[in-house]
Image (tube, grey):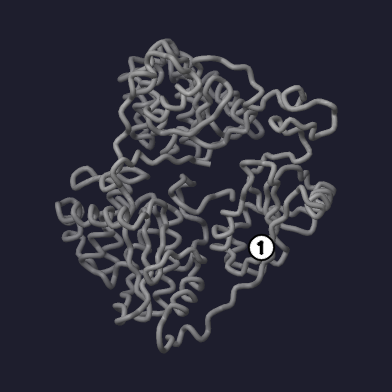
Amino acid sequence: MAAIPSCQREEASTARDGASATAKGGTAMPAAAAGAPQLELFVMSQCPYGVEVVNAAAAAKEKLGAAMDVKIQYIGDGKPGALQSMHGPAEVTGDLAQVCAMKQAPQQILSFITCQNKNPREVDKNWRDCATKNSIDPAALEKCIQGDEGQKLLTASFDEAKKRGAQGSPTMFLAGKPYEGGRKPRDFMRAVCEATKGEKPAACTSLPVAPKVSAIFFSDTRCKECDIHQLEPRLRSELSGLVVKHVDYASDEGKALYKELTGAGADFKTLPTVLLGQEVENDKDGYAAISRYLRKVGDYQELRLGGQWDPTAEICDNKSDDDGDGKVDCSDDGCGQSLGCRPTREKKLDLFVMSQCPYGAQAMIAAKEFTDHFKGQVSLDVHFIGDTKDGQLSSMHGPAEVDEDVRETCAAKLYGKDHQFLGYLACRSKDYRSTDWQGCAKEAGMDTSAIQKCFDGEGKQLVAQSFAYADSLKIGSSPTFLVNNKRDFNAVSASAIQREYCKDNPGLAACKDIIPEAAAPPGAAKGAQAPAGQCN
């Protein structure tokens, strides 16, 4: 899907417009009755998908009252005094405010959190106003947030998340079992009603029924990256009445469907995709959540997945003439940019990132450690992932990310010798939301006026070229490494980069000197490595 509903992989940093209904400000929720099904939510306070489910759970709890129990835990790393969360220090403060409010006013907690969720970017600041609105003593709350109590409460919550294997926000359990159902109030209500033993609450008798929505998951099994089965539960979380059918291009039905779609006049060409029936509009909440990703193609509403597989083109590694032009694999004109057909460039490494993707940031810090280790035994270039339309640059994490892409591109152009620019990139990546880029430039020995001159001049054109290069290689995930101009891989630690790089460049002296593994998060299993991920 265009947006993956989990902060295990990064997302746009604001909650969806028109998010689920929330509990009314200041409303105290009744304590759960003995035996009431418990919905456990493992979230991050600034993750839009975590925000969404907490809001929906609060609305469901408001309807079901004592018949539903809601418990919220938080996902992060560290120990007291050194706590970390994916979206940075502000999110840690937001988490602290919520665990402290949970301790001090358990019946007001859902109302307190949904108050904060009106502006999740400000959870490190809006807790005071939300406390006042919910009759929570701001002074007592501040003491907890800033003191040892809050640190201990949040550490315990982080530890519980690790114990339960919760890495993506949200991770949910209902009555002790993993929950992968819909994420709207009606979905939570229905699930709780079904899990209730004995007499059902009165609200269970009038639950709305989700409209049926037909969906064709259209892909091509010849494409290794085109499996979209895993999207079913994600899409069903928005359209709980989803009825799915999978169609493969190689089948007669698939070829006929492709012909129908390409003849529909909507510039349809690539797979995979999801085709929804027009009745999707009957599910008003679900349609509102995904409508921005839909376009009309023939008799369907296409959910744009960003698929780039042309099933009629030559496949460049199967020893077959797929497009019937008499040329096979790399000899075909269409395979020039295919990774396997590109010329080998030994001791070459390229990194494709988004400058404000948390995983991209980890990779840039690791790239600095890696190049310091390999010194003259690697040539590393950094490229950026984004879009250019009508001369305007855009990137997943907004205008601030584009601006930083430009500065980092300028740094690479002006200070490429001996990878000096990586000092700046690594420094910025440690706090990529900070606006103090000048401090990192000075720390890396760079002239801030030269960076600014490039930013105001050719910098945007250089980034446009960088975006175009990534697009030409069909690279859209941050971080992606390309080794020796031929093979791509994902890594966020110097040790992982070394392993992959040395597969294609064996015999280098620096390959024999093993970089230690990155430290795993506290509480992780013995031998575990730092978790990798990508912004897509």
> In x, y percent, where is residue 488?
54, 29
**Residue 447 visible in the shown view:** no
Residue 442 occupies quadrant:
top left
The residue at the point 52 percent across, 40 percent down is 396
Along the horizontal axis of the image, is 157 left or right of 56? Answer: left
**Residue 468 visible in the shown view:** yes
Q: Amino acid at mark 1?
A: Val
The residue at the point 79 percent across, 35 percent down is 322
The residue at the point 55 percent across, 25 percent down is 463
Residue 517 occupies quadrant:
top left
Q: Between 159 and 386, which is closer to the camera in this rendering?
A: 159
> In x, y percent, where is residue 50?
42, 57
> In x, y percent, where is residue 495?
37, 28
**Number of marks in the rendered image:** 1
Residue corresponding to mark 1: 244
Q: Between 55 and 207, which is closer to the camera in this rendering?
A: 207
